[in-house]
Image: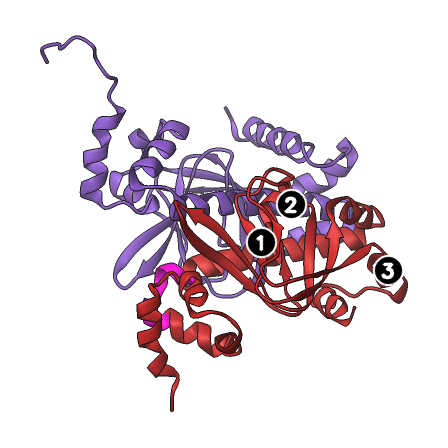
Chain colours: A purple, B red
Amino acid sequence: MNEQILYKHYLETVYTYFRRFIELSREEFDFIAPYFEIRKFDKKTKVLKIGETDKYFNIIMKGIARKYLMVKKKEVTIQLSTEGHMIHSEISFNLQQPSDCIIEAIEPVTFFSMSYENIQLIYQKIPKTEKLGRMIITEMFIKKDQRDFKQLNKTTRERFLDYMHNHPDMLQRVPQKYLASYLNIKPETFSRLKHLLRPKRNVPVKE
Amino acid sequence: MQSLYEYITRFTNVTQQEFEQMAGLLETIHCEKKHILTHKGQVEKYLYIINKGLVRKFFYKNKEEVITQIAREKDLVCSSVSFLSQKPSEYVVEALEPCTLFAMSYDNLQKIYSMGYHMERMGRLITLDWLLQKETWEHDRLRHEPKERFIRFMNENGDFVQRVQQKYLASYLNMKPETFSRYKHLLRG
């Protein structure tokens, strides 16, 4: 698909998503649409570095990105996101202050992004987007709480199975060490747990 | 109502009239120490602003209580995900002292939002504040050693030592009560 068609396709995706939350006419959306930018990054690009102020709110249209913290010299993955998800440093973006985390492309990624200034402009020009913003933030809050809750309340095995069940393609797409870090499981334990994913056989078969 | 006014104006300016409309939709609740405001499995009906007293929020990990919030005067507390999603609560909300609370029901909050975009904006900014607090809490928990977490927490919440049982503070900081006791010498001097 050429860029023009792709751009239109992305806009339609976003328009459909927005209308899950508020009524938004074509004319109103046409005002918002030009503020979206397509941003592409190669695999392993650090889209946001520690100390930089996050300028963009990103929706992933293609690829996978992760967010991580440096704890001593170790990377701790706190978000793994794929097509349809949003990724940004919530704190750095919303408070417009230097980031304490890193956002990195795991695969080549295409973001559909809007800058902080432009989002504020849209809130001013189309006040009903205040409600849209509130509802998107509410959804993010609920998701984050569910993740925190699982991290604190579920066993290692439960976290592993739960995640693999809900995200079956991630094992193919994401290096294991990132998945293990995200689920707060030691890499060795993670490898061991993988046998749980093989289908059970009633009759022994020769390999 | 001063506590509510101070809380709201952290996020947005409201006119006297808007504030009175909001205040008119609040219920005042008095409760005893140990009163359970929200049970596990119950849908959270209210958002509470604390006028007087202390409230904790926790969940059960097997039989252990894990505290995720300790709230005092001028703080907002509720089983937030249950309140926002209107689904059964995973958490328990309990008074730790006799409390006076201003309670905003879910339905009344929707009425406030329908008063205008100004109120939607307030809602957006308050929800965003919750999100950022949660994010900050997660980063702190991952980045800082227990000892560092203890010192940071005590610097900001010194008054809790007098008011809250140690085992609760230890649970909130995700450390054993013995570890908490051991760190207390750091506060002297």
Label 3 Cα neighbours within 10 Å, binned few <14 / some 14-19 / many ≥20: some
B155 versus A82 height, above or below: below
Same chain under badges 1 and 2? The reply is yes
Q: Earlier in the sequence, mark 1 or mark 3?
A: 3
Question: In which chain is the residue bearing label 3?
Answer: B
Q: To which residue does mark 1 refer?
A: B93
Label 2 Cα neighbours within 10 Å, binned few <14 / some 14-19 / many ≥20: many
Residue at 83% across / 50% down in the picture? Answer: B116
Q: Earlier in the sequence, mark 1 or mark 2?
A: 2
Q: Is residue A128 left or right of residue A33?
A: right
In the rendered structure, does residue B87 fall within the stretch colored magenta? no
Q: Residue furthest right?
A: B17
Q: Earlier in the sequence, mark 3 or mark 2?
A: 3
Numbered disc 1: secondary structure: strand
Residue A54 appearing in the image: no
**Magenta region's main secondary structure?**
helix
Q: To which residue does mark 2 refer?
A: B44
Residue bounds of the magenta highlight: B140-148
Q: To which residue does mark 3 refer?
A: B18
Instruction: Quote the CA–CA distance across marks 1 and 2.
Output: 10 Å
* Image position, residue A188 (x, y; %): 18, 42
* Image position, residue B84 (x, y; %): 64, 44
The amino acid at mark 2 is: Glu
The amino acid at mark 3 is: Glu
